[in-house]
Amino acid sequence: MGDELAGYVAERAAFNHIKLVRRMGAPSSYRIKGHLTSTGSKANTTVFYVFDIYDNNGKRVHRIEGLEPAGGTATGDPWAGVSSDSLKRIATRSMASLRAWLHSS
């Protein structure tokens, strides 16, 4: 699931003209750390996401956060209810928010 989301984030970043580098130590203006949590029941699932943006000194300078309703799961495992479409929506919203922040700062 993490690799799938990373692929969607890379796709949406390119669409928004945001250059991402994946290597540690590569020159960059900011570092992004993302966290996902899924919670739910047999009836519904929600993914909570946070992307913290850090400057080169390690200071957090911005946070993107939200939640994505992701349907339900018959197994009781909330990750089982998270679809590719849900991950695409998270990537789309997150990269649009990042672009807006970059252009406002």
Image (tube, rainbow, N blue to C red):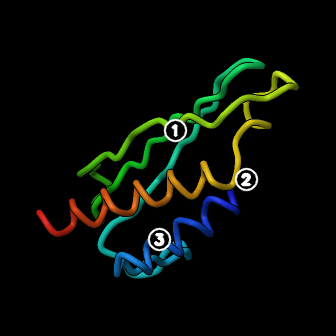
Tell me which corner region of the image, top left, top right, bottom left or bottom right, holds residue 97: bottom left
Image coordinates for residue 74, horizontal then vertical, percent: 85, 25
- For label 2, the SS is loop
Is residue 36 found left or right of 84 in the rendered image? Answer: left
Is residue 60 found left or right of 84 in the rendered image? Answer: left
Is residue 97 found left or right of 41 in the rendered image? Answer: left
- For label 1, the SS is strand
Residue at the spot 50% in from the left edge and 49% down from the top edge: 34
Residue farthest to the left, as pictured: 104
Of circles 3 and 2, the one toward us is 3
Verify CB contact (< 8 Å) between mark 1 and mark 3. no
Residue at the spot 38% in from the left edge and 49% down from the top edge: 52
Which numbered disc flags the more N-terminal residue, 1 or 3?
3
User: Pointer 2: residues within 10 angstroms few (<14), some, or many (20+)?
Assistant: few
Q: Compared with residue 80, is residue 30 higher up or lower down, i.e. above or below?
A: below
Q: Compared with residue 59, is residue 16 higher up or lower down, i.e. above or below?
A: below
Verify CB contact (< 8 Å) between mark 2 and mark 1. no
Q: Which residue type carries mark 3?
A: Arg
Tell me which corner region of the image, top left, top right, bottom left or bottom right, holds residue 81: top right
Image quadrant in which the C terminus is located: bottom left
Q: Which residue type carries mark 2?
A: Met
Verify CB contact (< 8 Å) between mark 3 and mark 2. no
Q: Which residue type carries mark 1?
A: Glu
Which numbered disc flags the more N-terminal residue, 2 or 1?
2
Is residue 36 found left or right of 57 in the rendered image? Answer: right
Q: Give the label on residue 12, or none.
A: 3
Cα–Cα gap, marks 3 and 2: 17 Å
Residue at the spot 32% in from the left edge and 56% down from the top edge: 54
Q: Compared with residue 100, is residue 34 higher up or lower down, i.e. above or below?
A: above
Residue under pointer 1: 68
Residue under pointer 2: 1
